[in-house]
Amino acid sequence: MTSEIWTEKFRPNTFDEITGQEDIVKRVKGLTNSMNIPHLLFAGPAGTGKSSLAIVIVKELFGSSWKENYLELNASDARGIDVVRQEVKNFARTKAIGKVPFKVIFLDEADALTREAQQALRRTMENFTSTCRFILSCNYSSKIIDPIQSRCAIFRFRLLEKKDIEKIIKRIAESEKLEIEEKAAEAIYESSEGDCRRVINLLQATSSISPKITYDLITTVVSSAKPSDIKIVLEYALSGDFVNSREKLLDIMLKESISGQDIIKAIQKEIWNLNIEPELKVKLIEKTGEIEFRLVEGSDEFIQLESLLASFVLAGRGR
């Protein structure tokens, strides 16, 4: 079973099934019950329920005929003005089937649309308000032009909290008859970083290996550095033992096949768990951010990480 099928299988079908966005769901549910929704703009990180909420709205409005009254386009696939002038406009100008007087067009990743396409979309939203409503989804609302934002009711989604992820994990475990260790559930949450889609994909990948999901199995599939290993690297460096710190870091990168940027993120998280002065933690975080920037710019991973460890050694000595 592919990850897309699993994602579709556990996609919410009602407002009550959407997890972690209770305030947004409450307001959108009220609009949907009135049978006359405005244009909507959903902004927020990936995997937080934007697409799911759009489909739930359409299902609540149209019932069994929702597919005939719904058009979904991914703007990152078709970014130009032609998709707005042709597909969107042709669908928007036709009347809806059923009692609801309008159709719904869902534009996913709308922040990928070019400015010209957004200007064309703005005119389409104006001209076909009587026959069509738009739901736009984006990661960054600042990339959507102001004329479109002013025509939409904007809802800002947040990353899912630990309790929300645990609820999703429990539901999937019951449905798929999985046994998940408490420590493994913690690791899933840390790896997902509040992204529900990552949770589903990670559970699918691990369950294909074993129905009993353990912490070690999660870390193997995720291919991320174990916090305990990173802690050893940092403790060596802060104690002044640069050689052992460097060798341990190299061992982690080669054996686990972990990239420099993933190592940097693991180091940044583990710094806050160290038993050191807050002022020193701030200095280490500042240096970590500088090295991460250099890696993004294309610098050699291991040389930059060696530089980071060297700066930690000096910081540990009070320099």
Image (cartoon, helix red, strand yellow):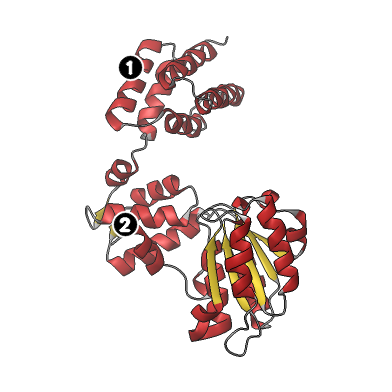
Circle 1 — which element? helix
Q: Which of the pair 244/155 is nearer the observer?
A: 155
- Type of residue at label 1? Glu
- Type of residue at label 2? Gln
Residue at 63% across / 86% down in the picture? 100
Q: CA distance from mark 1 to mark 2?
A: 34 Å
Q: Which of the pair 8/125 is nearer the observer?
A: 125
Q: Please state the horizontal and vertical placement of residue 34, each as a whole percent of the image.
A: 68, 83
Q: Residues within 10 Å of mark 1 (few under 14, many from 20)?
A: few
Q: Residues within 10 Å of mark 2 (few under 14, many from 20)?
A: some
Name the quarter where the C terminus is drawn. top right
The picture quadrant where one finds residue 177 is bottom left
Q: Nearer the viewer, mark 1 or mark 2?
A: 2
Reading the image, the residue beneath label 1 is 247
Q: Residue furthest left?
A: 210
Residue 118 visible in image: yes
Q: Is residue 219 above or below residue 209?
A: above
Q: Which of the pair 310/70 is nearer the observer?
A: 70
| Left or right: 281, with 230 as reference point | right
Chain-order first, disc 1 or disc 2: 2
Residue 22 visible in image: no
Residue at 52% across / 72% down in the picture? 55
Q: Please state the horizontal and vertical placement of residue 194, each as a whole percent of the image.
A: 50, 51
Name the quarter where the N terminus is drawn. bottom left
The picture quadrant where one finds residue 129 is bottom right
Residue at 66% across / 83% down in the picture? 35
Reading the image, the residue beneath label 2 is 204
Q: Please state the horizontal and vertical placement of residue 6, each as a whole percent of the image.
A: 35, 63
Circle 2 — which element? helix
